[in-house]
Image (spheres, grey):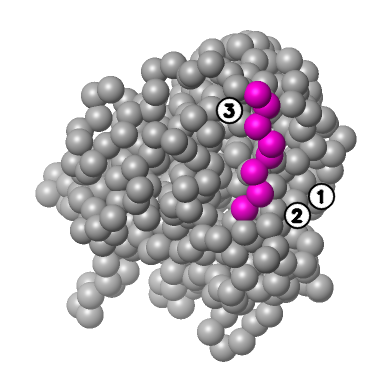
Amino acid sequence: MITLPLVRACRDDAVFAYRNRQPISMARFLSDIEQLAALLPARRYILNLCADRYHFVVGFFAALLRQQISLLPPNHTPDLIGQLGRTYADVYCLTDDANHDRTLETVFYPASSGPEQAVPSVPRLPADQIAAIVFTSGSTGQPVPNEKSWGGLVHSAAAEIDRLGLHAYPGMAVLGTVPPQHMYGLESTVLMVMQGGLALHAGRPFYPADILAELTALPRPRCLVTTPIHLRALLAEPAALPPLDFLLCATAPLPPQLAAAAETRFAAPLYEIYGCTEAGQIATRRTVETIEWRALPGIKLCQDAQGTWVNGGHVETAVLLHDVIELRGPGRFLLHGRTADLVNIAGKRTSLASLNYHLNSISGVRDGVFVMPEQNDVAATRLTAFVVAPGLTRKAVINALRQRVDAAFLPRPLCLVASLPRNDTGKLPREALCRLVAEYATQPEQS
């Protein structure tokens, strides 16, 4: 039986994490895992809702030692938690929120750790053990479960570390603005740290000022793992930004101008990751250097009448991608947006990704999205757009769009809103967009 260690490249006295700006050693971490594992009930599934990233990681690996599978849904709404309880009857919840609504049997993360025992040895787990069931974000419909083996997760982390050259940054502190329950957060703020000899930041600061303060408090080298929506907010800050050593971005394609601004103001290289929940991370690019994506080691892409398939490396079962991809050579490709995003109006074609890019490039637009309403056999296709643009009128946004896109794709209507219903990773679930469309359909068109 093949087994793989929980962590690599770390001494017992090395810093594993920074929590409340205090270091936590590798020995303390391993001890905390053993102590929590002894407290967990005998169940098959665990719903790990810990908001503190360190607590989440301890809970994730304590559950693995008990051969339990972590359920990682895209959100924690009562409705979805109720669905999980009905589908996975043998599930309980681990949380560090004292006010948590106990819909499921609940274990609260211990308020304090017990005395540190003799340094535990690093546990090894079977490569074929199912570690997690990760659910899609729901951006194209209902969340779908995807099993992840321990071996697949470890090989994914190793491929990421190798491609990004992270062995050159031993002990680098990694702060993430994405939750560890999301596939990107799990891969790049948890597994990358544990398999690469890095150190995780336990928090998940939300506001730009808090993110910058926490980054400044971390020692060098330091890395920020974030999303385009968070990055845009950080770059809007007028004050000088703390220098970093590495920037990682994912969940949506990043405009080259934004990537260049980020590299300049943070004085660090920025890399993007392309992937999906079903396959995990697939490819990377340094956005200021190329528009091409390069597949991670071992990953292969092929195309047939159904679309583009990815397999090999850490992708254990062939996955059909939901994106329009142009293969440029072995392991190299261009990304043209979601298959479901293609728009054909009056014989003219574009994609929602392209329209969103032009909308968000308008000066004064803080956030914006085009929506393709549900189709019917009677009405002609009419796009809707929702825009966060304090200080701009609807007419000003429309006039700016006229300079960028064909008139056939101008939104009818364009709605000015205070904010968009983005989730923790900056994505817009389809269900939330449908509610927004329905809400504004009953209102008079804005002037």
- Where is residue 117 drawn, in percent x and y? 60, 22
Q: Looking at this view, is 14 or 296 the one in front?
A: 14
Circle nearer the N terminus (3, 2): 3
- In the image, taking residue 70 as reference, residue 418 lies left or right, namely left
Q: Is residue 160 above or below residue 23?
A: below
Please, what is the three-letter code of the amino acid marked with disc 2? Answer: Ala
Q: Which corner quadrant holds the C terminus?
A: top left
Residue linked to disc 3: 31
Q: Chief secondary structure of the magenta span?
A: loop
Camera sees residue 91: yes
Please, what is the three-letter code of the amino acid marked with disc 3? Answer: Ser
**Contact? badges 3 and 1 (CB < 8 Å):** no
**Contact? badges 2 and 1 (CB < 8 Å):** yes
Please, what is the three-letter code of the amino acid marked with disc 1? Answer: Asp
Q: Looking at this view, is 199 or 121 the one in front?
A: 121
Question: How far apart, in angstroms, are the residues tagged by discs 3 and 1?
Answer: 29 Å
**Contact? badges 3 and 2 (CB < 8 Å):** no
Residue linked to disc 1: 162
Question: How far apart, in angstroms, are the residues tagged by discs 2 and 1?
Answer: 5 Å
Magenta part of the protein: which range? 118-125
- Where is residue 109 drawn, in percent x and y? 38, 27
* Residue at 82% over, 31% down: 169
